């Protein structure tokens, strides 16, 4: 067995050039992705989470070759996918598929399911429209939990959850090894969201497909993923086992995301509200076109130190065995056995008594 990961992103940087305007200086580039690294194995899911604008979709678009990368490598079975020639593009497209947020705009409204899913089969396997292709489409409908009656339906005759299942069936039609699901469940109601997540999980158990699962909701990402990466302004600030990070985050930003998840238990909800108030919730994140020299979370973080304003923390091993980029774990004060959340709370208590 090869010791190389099946799919890997290494030190990826993506910058968007600033648009020049007549008689005005060219603005600096938008640094949307700044040194992201992660890998995914078959049967596994890597979740990317972060607020709007943190660079999640740009990572997805870089993998799908929809944007140019500044530097870094993206490899599938050891091959650099950023250098796929146009002749090999169809092979790449059959190995890596995408399922996006809005199936209404990505599915052709004038076609029935038999054509939407069937055309993908024709393109990749050369099976022309007819009984055999319909049979393949119906097998895929079974896989995503839709009855065979959906063969004749148009997208506008379906609910959001059903359309998303059709998108998944279309992606599966080419037997991909990696599916990039970018906010694939975000627009759905909670109950439909969990049905679609169950479909994705069952498909993974049946086919071994790997997922890059992108969402801004950490609760959903945790539910879906084996490993998770937390993005803030283009940086991966924390990465590791999804369950361990959710239960014991080591970066204040991850803690803030968790504190924002509504909880049914009123006691826990009150604790989370009070933790949320420790953060500067009014501070605007810096612009990705003029990132500060230090930690980009510094103006929202409740436990900032001098070094945070001066130096970007390097990735170090977190208590959960994954990685974290925060000075608290390197040149910061000893946490003295406290978790980051306890440290944030005790710092807040100390400052309220001064
Ligand atoms: N084509 C582009 N040209 C210039 N800037 C861009 C372009 N695409 C994205 N950006 C910028 O890059 C940053 C990252 O955007 P991206 O869409 O990757 O974030 P995201 O995490 O997917 O956000 P969301 O949760 O809203 O989908 C943002 O500041 C965005 O404005
Ligand atoms: S590096 Fe400093 S400012 Fe950034 S998250 Fe850690 S403690 Fe907060
Ligand atoms: Mg996005």
Image (cartoon, rainbow, N blue to C red):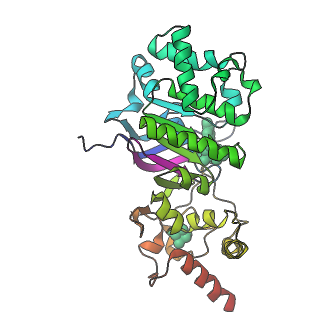
Residue 232, relative to residue 326: is it above or below? above
- Name the residue furthest right: 157
Q: Is residue 95 visible?
A: yes
Relative placement, left or right, of 206 versus 156 is left
> Would you say residue 32 sits in the magenta stretch?
yes
Q: Who's the residue at 73% across and 28% down the image?
A: 158
> Residue 102 location in percent, x, y?
68, 34
Q: Who's the residue at 58% across and 78% down the image?
A: 344
> Would you say residue 299 sits in the magenta stretch?
no
Q: Who's the residue at 71% across and 29% down the image?
A: 104
Q: Who's the residue at 68% across and 20% down the image?
A: 108
- Name the residue furthest bottom: 354
Ligand 1: quadrant of the figure: top right
Q: Quadrant of the N terminus?
A: top left
> Residue 224 location in percent, x, y?
53, 50
Residue 332, relative to residue 162: is it above or below? below
Numbered disc total: 0
Q: Is residue 30 visible?
A: no
Predominant secondary structure in magenta?
Answer: strand
What is the magenta range?
Answer: 31-49
Q: Quadrant of the C terminus?
A: bottom right
**Among the 4 quarters of the image, the one containing residue 78:** top left
Which one is nearer the viewer's eye here, 315 or 21?
A: 315
Relative placement, left or right, of 188 versus 96 is right
> Residue 219 location in percent, x, y?
60, 57
Relative placement, left or right, of 177 versus 220 is left
**Among the 4 quarters of the image, the one containing residue 304:** bottom right
> Residue 203 location in percent, x, y?
50, 37
- Name the residue furthest left: 1
Which one is nearer the viewer's eye here, 29 or 197?
A: 197
Which one is nearer the viewer's eye here, 189 or 330?
A: 189
């Amino acid at each position: 067995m090869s010791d190389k990961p099946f799919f890997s992103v290494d030190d990826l940087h993506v910058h968007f050039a600033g648009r020049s305007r007549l008689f005005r200086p060219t603005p600096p580039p938008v640094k949307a992705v700044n040194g992201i690294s992660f890998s995914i194995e078959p049967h596994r899911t890597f979740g990317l989470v972060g607020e709007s604008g943190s660079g999640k979709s740009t990572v997805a678009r870089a993998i799908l070759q929809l944007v140019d990368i500044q530097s870094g490598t993206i490899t599938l079975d050891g091959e650099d996918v950023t250098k796929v020639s146009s002749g090999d593009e169809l092979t790449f497209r059959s190995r890596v598929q995408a399922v996006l947020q809005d199936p209404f705009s990505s599915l052709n409204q004038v076609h029935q399911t038999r054509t939407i899913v069937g055309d993908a089969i024709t393109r990749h396997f050369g099976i022309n429209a007819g009984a055999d292709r319909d049979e393949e489409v119906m097998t895929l409908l079974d896989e995503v939990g839709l009855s065979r009656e959906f063969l004749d339906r148009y997208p506008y005759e379906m609910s959001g959850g059903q359309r998303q299942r059709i998108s998944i069936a279309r992606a599966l039609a080419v037997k991909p090894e990696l599916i990039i699901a970018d906010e694939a469940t975000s627009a759905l109601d909670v109950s439909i969201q969990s049905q679609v997540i169950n479909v994705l999980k069952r498909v993974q158990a049946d086919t071994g497909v790997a997922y890059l699962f992108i969402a801004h909701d950490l609760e959903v990402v945790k539910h879906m993923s084996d490993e998770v990466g937390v993005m803030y302004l283009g940086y991966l600030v924390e990465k590791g086992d999804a369950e361990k990070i959710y239960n014991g985050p080591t970066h204040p930003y991850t803690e803030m995301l968790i504190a924002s998840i509504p909880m049914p238990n009123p006691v826990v909800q009150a604790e989370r509200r009070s933790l949320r108030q420790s953060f500067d919730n009014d501070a605007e994140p810096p612009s990705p076109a003029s990132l500060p020299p230090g930690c980009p979370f510094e103006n929202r973080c409740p436990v900032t130190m001098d070094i945070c304003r001066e130096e970007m923390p390097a990735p170090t091993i977190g208590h959960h065995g994954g990685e974290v980029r925060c000075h608290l774990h390197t040149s910061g004060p000893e946490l003295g056995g406290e978790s980051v959340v306890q440290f944030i709370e005790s710092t807040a208590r100390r400052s309220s008594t001064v």
